[in-house]
Amino acid sequence: MPEKHNMPEGAIPCLDKGFVRLVDSMGGDEAIVQAARVSYGKGTSKVSQDRGLIRYLMRHRHTTPFEMVEFKFHAKMPIFVARQWVRHRTANINEYSLRYSEARDEFYYPDPEHIQFQSALNKQGRAGKVPKKLTDKVMKYFREISERSFEMYQELNDAGLAKELIRAILPVNLYTEWYWKNDLHNLLHFIGLRSDLHAQYEIRVYSDAMAESVKKVAPFAWEAYQDYVVDGMRFSRAEQNLLETRLPERVIDDIVEDVAYQITATLHNNKPRKDGELYELYQKQGGSDVESDFQLKWDSGEIELGNVRELKEFREKLTKMKK
Ligand SMILES: Cc1cc2nc3c(=O)[nH]c(=O)nc-3n(C[C@H](O)[C@H](O)[C@H](O)COP(=O)(O)OP(=O)(O)OC[C@H]3O[C@@H](n4cnc5c(N)ncnc54)[C@H](O)[C@@H]3O)c2cc1C
């Protein structure tokens, strides 16, 4: 665990000596909605409608309203993690400079459980338990190289050599620090890539910590990002062709039928209808069950609610598949 004494207040510990701390944020879900309403015209702003609008924007990749929310983090991470992190070009960064300031004796030493073999399947991954003897050797080498290089650095620094040059003998497990500011759209993109299991464990830890701030500052946007981007699925043209030709029409019809029930139930939930109006409403949504079957299903209470607009979009996609 990280050394607590070096941890600023409110920081989330990361790796053995690092952290992420949300320094400041501007806006939240309400700022996304406020910006979006400029393009869609003014409307009412009930919380449920805000959520619906944010989900609509995310679904349709209308991304600029998400850029209205800003996050500023203070983070401390090993240089090899910063090296990956800095590839995310849309952020504003200011980093601790080893040209002006002395390096500190702070190196990343992995926990034994994270010392693994090179994965045979994934060129960018780890796999397999390493025998204790070899784990001990890895940890010893990490310590030896870090301590020895730092001694050399100090010796050259004491002799008055330029810091900007002698820093180059320090290994990339040395900790650095920075302030990193980005907007929500690009931060979600960062988290999407870096919290994914394909990303390196050491950067995932930071990405997961930053996700905690996003969840608090913009919970609807976070939820929508999970639903439509992280857990959503898109089909290529070839995949769609295959589905269109191989999926039996009756299966599509069954799903359309379920959607008709869900739309009806959701409309009824949003604005209650009289019992006598429900079957007609269901038929208008493309439902084809006879009235007695409709009544049986309706009375079962098993119909899930959803978002009317989203369900209609889904129905459109399903209908297109039948052509
Ligand atoms: C698992 C994993 C493995 C990786 N492996 C490698 C690797 O082997 N080698 C390697 O070099 N990198 C690697 N990367 C880094 C990767 O290629 C990207 O550089 C990094 O993820 C940043 O993504 P980005 O460019 O989308 O993000 P950002 O730089 O934050 O950009 C966000 C978006 O803005 C737009 N954008 C930003 N700048 C420009 C621009 N100049 N021109 C056009 N559009 C722009 C793009 O739409 C981009 O998606 C890896 C990343 C991951 C997550």
Image (cartoon, helix red, strand yellow):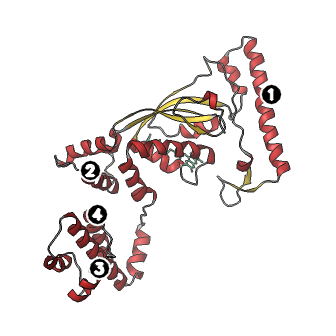
Q: Quadrant of the N terminus?
A: top right
Q: Say if mark 4 contacts mark 2, CB within 8 Å.
A: no
Kindly state the secondary structure of the residue where label 3 is placed: helix
Q: Nearer the viewer, mark 2 or mark 1?
A: 2
Q: Which residue is mark 4?
A: 307
**Type of amino acid under label 4:** Asn
User: Residue 20 location, x and y as percent?
Assistant: 54, 36
Q: Say if mark 1 contacts mark 4, CB within 8 Å.
A: no
CA gap between label 1 and label 4 equals 61 Å
Measured along the vertical axis of the image, is residue 321 above or below residue 30? below
Q: Say if mark 2 contacts mark 3, CB within 8 Å.
A: no
Which label's residue is closer to the chain start, 2 or 3? 2
User: Residue 197 location, x and y as percent?
Assistant: 58, 54
Q: Which residue is mark 1?
A: 148
CA gap between label 3 and label 4 equals 16 Å
Q: Say if mark 1 contacts mark 3, CB within 8 Å.
A: no
**Residue at figure coordinates x 29%, y 82% from the top left:** 297
Q: Quadrant of the C terminus?
A: bottom left
**Type of amino acid under label 2:** Val
Which label's residue is closer to the chain start, 3 or 4? 3
Q: Residues within 10 Å of mark 2 (few under 14, many from 20)?
A: few
Which label's residue is closer to the chain start, 1 or 3? 1
CA gap between label 2 and label 3 equals 30 Å
Q: In terms of image quadrants, where is residue 12?
A: top right
**Type of amino acid under label 1:** Arg
CA gap between label 1 and label 3 equals 70 Å
Which of the pair 94/215 is nearer the observer? 215
